Each structure stands twice: as structure tokens, then as C-alpha cells.
Amino acid sequence: MIVKKIRKGITLACCFCLMATRAAPVTIQAKVPEQAQPLMAFITSYSTDLAISGNGTASVTAYVIAKSNATNTYVKATLQKKTGSNLVNVKAWEATGNRGYTGIIETYSVSGGTYRVIATIKADSETKNVTSATKTY
């Protein structure tokens, strides 16, 4: 009986040794953001977006959040409509500010078609151009 227990123990120990030596090496990989942005001197964050409601009201947003060392901010958002293979400017809005947050939140009635927003974002000497996803109404 004792011999059987010893054999089982040795067999079990051998199995664990085999599993340990055959285990795949563990690789640790740092999580990389999908869209890495370079370090900016005057801009903390920025964005633009377009939403079109069921009744044809386009909601246009664009903003910049400046770092504390920025003194002047500027945002221009342009609503564009796709006509054939061209993009035609439909309406544009501008806003300026001194530090902090500067943004545009506007609505505009649209007819059927595909639209997007392009925005120019500035904080002091730093400029970023950003485009929203396209939306079809």
C-alpha cells in the first residue's frame, strides 16, 4: 500500500515537471494605444464630431482644450457635403478664446446626402486639422 502511494507521488511529480518544462514562455507586452498622438506643447486635447438626427438636424461640435501655457485658442468647424466625388463646404463656424476651452456647438438643417465636419484647431503656434466620421441622412 505504501509502495503504491510512493509510486503515485513520483508519477504525479514527474507529470508536474513535464508540464513545467513544456509550458510556453510568458510574454508581457505593454498596451499600445490604437492612435498614439505626439506630445503637444500647447494643446491638451481636441476633437470634432457630427451627428444627424432623424429630422435632418446636423449637430456640429469641435473643441480645443489648451494647456495653461497657451494664451490664444481658435477653432473653425466646416460642415461639408459630398456631391459626386467632390466635397462642398455647406456652413462654417469660428470661435476664439484666451486659454482653457474653446469650442463650437452648432446645429444646421441638412437635406439628404453624406456629410462630414473638418476642423482647424489652434493653440498659440500649434495647429491640428481633424475630420469627423461621415454621416448619411
Image (tube, rainbow, N blue to C red):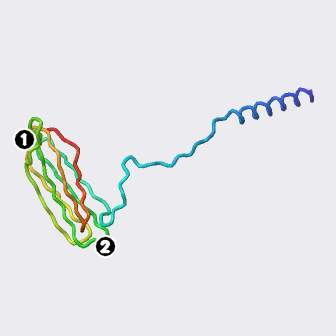
In the rendered image, which residue does mark 2 sit on? 69
Tally of marks? 2
Q: Earlier in the sequence, mark 2 or mark 1?
A: 2
In the image, taking residue 100 as reference, residue 106 lies left or right, namely: left
Q: Position of residue 90 (x, y in %)?
A: 7, 48
Q: Position of residue 8 (x, y in %)?
A: 84, 28
Q: Are marks 2 and 1 in contact (CB under 8 Å)?
A: no
Q: Amino acid at mark 2?
A: Asn
Q: Position of residue 75 (x, y in %)?
A: 18, 61
Q: Amino acid at mark 1?
A: Ser
Dot 2 crowding, Cα within 10 Å, few <14, some 14–19, many 20+: few
**Residue at image x 20%, y 42%?**
134
Vertical placement of 58 versus 69: above or below?
above
In the image, taking residue 86 as reference, residue 66 lies left or right, namely: right
SS for callout 2: loop
SS for callout 1: loop
**Residue at image x 69%, y 32%?**
22
Vertical placement of 106 versus 8: above or below?
below
- Tell me which corner region of the image, top left, top right, bottom left or bottom right, holds residue 53: top left
- Tell me which corner region of the image, top left, top right, bottom left or bottom right, holds residue 66: bottom left
- Residue 111 is marked as 1
Q: Position of residue 105 (x, y in %)?
A: 17, 57
In the image, taking residue 5 as reference, residue 55 lies left or right, namely: left
Dot 1 crowding, Cα within 10 Å, few <14, some 14–19, many 20+: few
If the image is split into quadrants, where does the C terminus sit?
A: top left
Vertical placement of 109 versus 94: above or below?
above
